[in-house]
Amino acid sequence: MTTRLTRRTFLTTTVAGAAVVGFPLTPRAQAKTFKIGAVHPVTGPLAEPGQACRLGAQMAVEAVNAAGGIKSKGGMKLELIVGDTQTKPENGRVEAERVVTQGAQMLLGSFDSGSTAAMVSVAQQRRVPFLVDIAAADPITANVAKSVKEGQQKVQYVYRNFPTGSSFGRKAVQYFTEIFAEAKVTPKRVVLMYCNDLFGQNQSRGFLAAYKAAKPAWTLLEEDVIAWPEPPSDLSTEVSKAKSLKPDVIAPITRPASAQLLLPEIRKQRLDILGIVGPGSPGFYEAGQIAILKEDVEYAMVSNPWANFKNPKTNQVAEEYKKRSNGKTFDTNSGYSYDAILVAADVLERAASLDDPDGIVEALRKTSFGGGLMQYAGPVVFNELGDNPNAVTTMTQILGQKAVAVWPKEAALQKFVFPRPKA
Amino acid sequence: MKWATGLAVAVLLALPAVLSGYAVTIFVLIFFYAFLAQAWNIVGGYAGQLSAGHAAFVGIGGYTAALLFERGVTPWIGMFVGGALAAVLGAIVGYLGFRFGLRGFYFVLLTVAFAEICRILATNIDAVGGAVGLYITFTGNPRQFQFQDQRAYYYIALVLMLLATGVAALIERRRFGIYLTAIREDETACEALGVDVLRYKLLAMIVSSFLAGLGGTFYAFQNFSLQPGAVFGIPLSVEIVIRPIIGGAGTLLGPILGSFILTPLGELSRSYFGQSGLHGAHLIVYGVLLVTVVLFMPQGAYPFLKQLFKRA
Amino acid sequence: MAVGLTLIFGVMRVVNFAHGDMMVWGMYLAFVFATRLGVDPYLSFPVCAAALFLLGVVVQRGLVDPIIAAPHEMQILLMLGVALVLENTALLVFGPEPARVRSPLARLTWDVGPLYVDVARLVTFAVAVVLTLALSLFLFRTDLGRLIRASADNHYGALVIGADVRRIYATAFGIGAACVGAAGALVSPILPFQPPTGLSLSVTSFNIVIIGGMGSLVGAFIGGLLVSVAESLGAVFLRPSLKELFSFSLLIIILLFRPAGLFGKRQS
């Protein structure tokens, strides 16, 4: 008898729970808005960039609405429904489902490639256009394109406005070559060091592959690449290993935590190098990082997606971002999320009807948008894989304790300094 | 009792028709984690051998199926291969642990060490994707264990949960289960009585890890990506272990109840707190709840409720 | 760090999963002292230790004590819950970015012949040795210390002789937490830390304590040395990214062949 009672209670609880969950909190807005679901890791190990992304997107939505919303659709305002993946890949799917259930007609996200891949399935299953703002892993879009090509899926709903892992590598090698040529130096012992997590491995693979393909004048020690588990508690062994290779340039791929260990260690062990030139990673340019690393990061160069600070609008937004984020730099993460909203707004202006996802996709494919705040090699367009080939990286250098763009020439705000001055 | 179960199952079968997409996803999570929890329950609850490294089995199952899928093998078969490989690892860990007489906390550490080793290996071996992990192409093709409609996952997860519960129920009723309980309560006495303790514990471990391995395939083909940190990591093992413990380890309904409590709680607190910008607040709630349950319902929710209703 | 954990386990058989997260709070406290009050962590660590002592006592009295007799799983879960709360409160209060404390000492290196010695690490090592010695003196020479060891060895015996076991447990837990608070402060200039760092610190602590032997101070100390050396060797001879593999493999071997650890006593 007791077991039966427990089962019945169990049942009622289930149904009650289902009722609660089945009817989620409705948004407060009364007027009809176009809802965009922005899913980022705002808690967990990737909380810092995730929070930056969310703030960037929020600011962009406010800017678009202040300028009149989607003018061709009667000034319809955008509304952001935010989601948190907690830096766990499976939550990408759950949060995407939740925001779609709450009315999101477009998806944005989600910084780390794992949860982004999980969101892809939701986008394809529920036919919701998904603009990836950050997340470099090539398969995210390439796999969907393949599916469509093979006829397994009818429409590709996933697009990305961000450099892919392979383009990161290609651009990095290109900049290395150009900068070394301009400085009339040909390093013969470039040592690649990277953090052995998803990001670091992806980046280093792209870089190595691009190097092999380009066969530049300078030499990277391909057999002597050094990796460390991220986050590291100590990098002295790794740096002494690097030192034993007699490097003339160190090419690091770091995360903020490892950068804090690596750069001082390079100084402590008195590595005699021409400079630190990174193929692309966080950890060097953020205001907080510079404040902690001080002289150790001066003259370090890193090739990252970067905001176009020659554009006055960018500077305005950067100022506002600094205020609202307690002093953080407007960078890759906040910037690309911001731009993603701008691109989305442009797409919605051109879409025939906001209620037809395939129509939105059509408008998306025809995008040629020049109003982005980031550094591009041309207008935002989408190729047959769904990526933006014009999303590129910029080589920045820490000069005077600030990160400035130094290469390519059209993006440069200052001239680069290489080799770095002797200590 | 039989018809109560039948009624419950019937209700669960009918639910997708009335639930929103998001709710369906929540249920999928509840069932899936209940399934993993029940798998753990067999060796952790009934046999009393705490394993904090069950994520390793899930990971192996998932990776195997994903790698086979890349080579054209359908996940429906890959699932069982993955489960088998997971069972092999389970046998190894079990054998080492039990043969060398590791009990309690020491066995826990052994399982954690194995899981971490799997994770580190997976992160560093390029052939299995390294830290980047594996990405599965979304095709929506049922033959490839993918579905255009989320509801299909709901039913599969439900079947998995019922399957694991069925296995547990079977074990509970037969001699095997009785032996396990005896071993859990007093292993030394069992040995003195001549029971082949090693064999039974090992068997429980193999069954448990096989089921967990099956779960790995489900995970892989629901999330379309596998990262070593996520599938082999401690957080997943914690999720697996928490549910039976909160719900009642060693009981049939414990893991299910635990999942029904914890998963919606996690989701609700995350969506509620996540919105207001109080980052991390929901995990604090999670932690506080853990502490509360441990302090006031140490046997788990299910036995607690059972007691409550006995008095009612 | 490991010494603290071994003390807690040795005395109360409580597995403190929140160990790493307590250490992170020690680090954050040192950070606050350094940034707000300008106090160098090498000076502020006693205060951090004291603060964490209090935290330890509170946690023990309030949460652990009621379930001291409960099965192990419960204690593990309890401390896990505490860990979650600690980690995410830190996240709320301090934000997710990695932080590190700047100390002038941390930037120095000594040249000793062909070797470079990192002054900061040397100082940390020296202080750790001193603290461990002080702790063993306390445990072996003072009355309270002897009581703690007695309760560890024989719970009922201690009760029989009228020892206030609850107070002893609280003190032991507090001391364990204090160790970790000091460790956190001392390490804060060397190791960048974020709220999630707690988990990896906990895992390392457990690794060390098992290898060295649960309940043995010497073991914890030697274990700590062993694990670091093993990892560094691993980094040199294998790929550095596999260095954790070394310590885990060592853990498994010890577990199988000498579960009491190198210096531990056999569990009854």
Image (spheres, coloured by chain):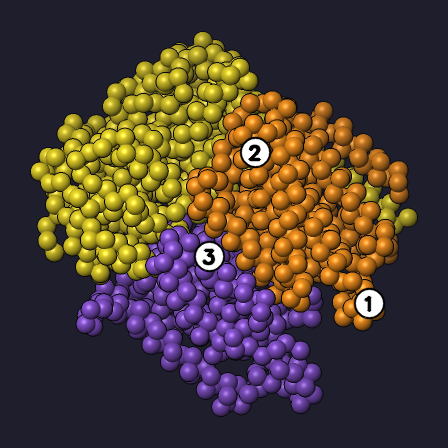
State the residue position of label 1.
B194
SS at circle 1: loop
State the residue position of label 3.
C245
Which of the pair B264/A298 is nearer the observer? A298
For disc 3, the neighbor class at 10 Å (few under 14, some 14 to 19, many from 20) is many
Q: Is residue A71 left or right of residue C200?
A: left
Mark 3–mark 1 Cα distance, whole angstroms, equals: 39 Å
| The C terminus of chain A: image quadrant | bottom left
**Mark 3: amino acid:** Leu
Q: Position of residue A50 (x, y in %)?
A: 41, 40
Quick check: B190 above or below A206?
below
Question: Can residue A24 be seen by looking at this rendering?
Answer: no
Q: Position of residue C58 (x, y in %)?
A: 55, 70
Q: Could you tell me which chain the residue with mark 2 belongs to?
A: B
**Mark 2: amino acid:** Leu
Q: Could you tell me which chain the residue with mark 3 belongs to?
A: C
Mark 2–mark 3 Cα distance, whole angstroms, equals: 26 Å
Mark 1–mark 2 Cα distance, whole angstroms, equals: 43 Å
State the residue position of label 2.
B68
To the question of a shared chain for discs 3 and 1, the answer is no
Which of the pair B118/A140 is nearer the observer? B118
To the question of a shared chain for discs 2 and 3, the answer is no
Quick check: C22 above or below C162?
above
To the question of a shared chain for discs 1 and 2, the answer is yes
Q: Colour of chain C?
A: purple
Q: Colour of chain B?
A: orange
Which of the pair A273/B281 is nearer the observer? A273
Q: Position of residue A229 (x, y in %)?
A: 40, 52
Q: Is residue C23 left or right of residue B250?
A: left
